[in-house]
């Protein structure tokens, strides 16, 4: 399990407050709980993408059941369990929304751009599908008696909301061509589609992919990098409210790689 980085999220968060080894039990238990959820969500995502393997679904359900059992039998405070229910409801709503979302129609590689494209005005909402991954790390903090109030929980909620939105946007930036080929409209592909529509350019993913790459560079790459950096900055601002500094493990392991990749892309674009 430790080979999957999500296992360390509870450890990174606890160590950002107190690096004392006395919290080893909480780190290990909730690290494993985090992996149970991580694996379940990955399997469910495959089904939402139309690539799910039926023989893996029981394993996904098993992992999700273990995650729920660990959270609800850990004697966590009522206010946290109520918050957990809210995160799981957000997850369910996001999955339902994705399953019902209209996709781009492709015929012989030609992309038929919809007359009405969605707006991604609140990029923090990109965390809706992954915000449940904040549950186990925060539960570990509570069981370690590191945080004790709903105010602290709300700040951590905001931290993860922006951090995980930045992570999702970064993933969308990496997968944009595959997403476009699969007909998915994301916060990145929508920028390409809008620019093509504005310039009245017909997109053919098979015969003229270079046009699409140029549109990505012109319309999406720089803007997406700036949006990722903004979300990271917002996450760090929330972290500061509870004395988590820029050199803490949760920042250096979760936030900094996103910042470095985005800044590297921006620096490269300046050289073009």
Image: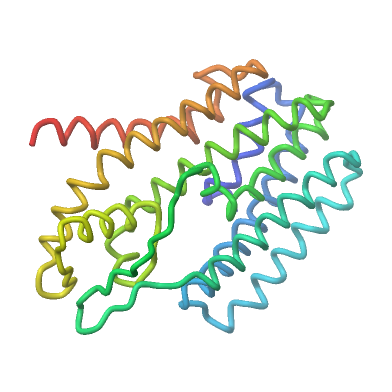
Residue 221, quarter of picture: top left
Query: Where is residue 70 drawn, in percent x and y?
Result: 81, 53
Query: Where is residue 3 drawn, in percent x and y?
Result: 52, 50
What number of labels is visible?
A: 0
The vertical placement of 161 against 267, above or below, is below
* Residue drawn at the location 60% of the way across and 24% of the way down: 238
Query: Where is residue 230 drawn, in percent x and y?
Result: 42, 30
Locate residue 30 relative to residue 149 in the image: left or right: left
The vertical placement of 164 against 249, above or below, is below
Work out whether residue 7 or residue 98 is closer to the camera in this orientation and state it. Answer: 98
Work out whether residue 126 or residue 255 is closer to the camera in this orientation and state it. Answer: 126
Work out whether residue 135 or residue 166 is closer to the camera in this orientation and state it. Answer: 166
Task: Give the colour scheme of this rendering.
Answer: rainbow
Residue 80, quarter of picture: top right
Q: Quadrant of the C terminus?
A: top left
Locate residue 233 relative to residue 139 in the image: left or right: left
The vertical placement of 189 against 254, above or below, is below
* Residue drawn at the location 65% of the way across and 61% of the way down: 93
Locate residue 119 relative to residue 65 in the image: left or right: left
Query: Where is residue 187 drawn, in percent x and y?
Result: 39, 52
Locate residue 167 relative to residue 210 in the image: left or right: right
The vertical placement of 47 against 162, above or below, is below
* Residue drawn at the location 61% of the way across and 39% of the way down: 9
Q: In which quarter of the image is the N terminus?
A: bottom right
* Residue drawn at the location 73% of the way across and 57% of the way down: 89
């Amino acid at each position: 399990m430790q080979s999957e980085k999500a296992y360390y999220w509870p450890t990174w968060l606890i160590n950002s407050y107190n690096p004392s080894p006395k919290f080893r039990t909480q780190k290990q238990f909730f690290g494993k709980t985090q992996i149970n959820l991580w694996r379940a969500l990955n399997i469910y995502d495959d089904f939402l993408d139309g690539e799910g393997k039926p023989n893996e679904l029981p394993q996904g359900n098993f992992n999700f059941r273990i995650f729920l059992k660990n959270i609800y039998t850990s004697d966590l405070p009522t206010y946290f369990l109520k918050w957990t229910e809210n995160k799981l409801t957000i997850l369910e709503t996001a999955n339902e929304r994705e399953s019902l979302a209209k996709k781009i129609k492709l015929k012989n590689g030609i992309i038929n751009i919809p007359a009405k494209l969605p707006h991604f005005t609140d990029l923090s909402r990109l965390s809706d599908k992954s915000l449940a991954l904040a549950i186990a790390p925060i539960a570990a903090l509570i069981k370690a008696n590191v945080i004790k109030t709903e105010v602290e929980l709300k700040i951590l909620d905001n931290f993860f909301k922006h951090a995980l939105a930045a992570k999702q946007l970064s993933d969308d930036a990496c997968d944009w061509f595959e997403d476009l080929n699969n007909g998915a409209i994301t916060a990145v592909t929508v920028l390409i589609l809008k620019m093509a529509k504005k310039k009245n350019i017909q997109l053919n993913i098979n015969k003229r992919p270079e046009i699409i790459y140029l549109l990505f560079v012109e319309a999406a790459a720089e803007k997406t990098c700036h949006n990722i950096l903004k979300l990271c900055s917002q996450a760090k601002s929330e972290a500061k409210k509870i004395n988590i500094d820029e050199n803490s493990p949760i920042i250096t392991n979760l936030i900094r790689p996103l910042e470095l990749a985005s800044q590297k892309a921006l620096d490269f674009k300046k050289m073009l």
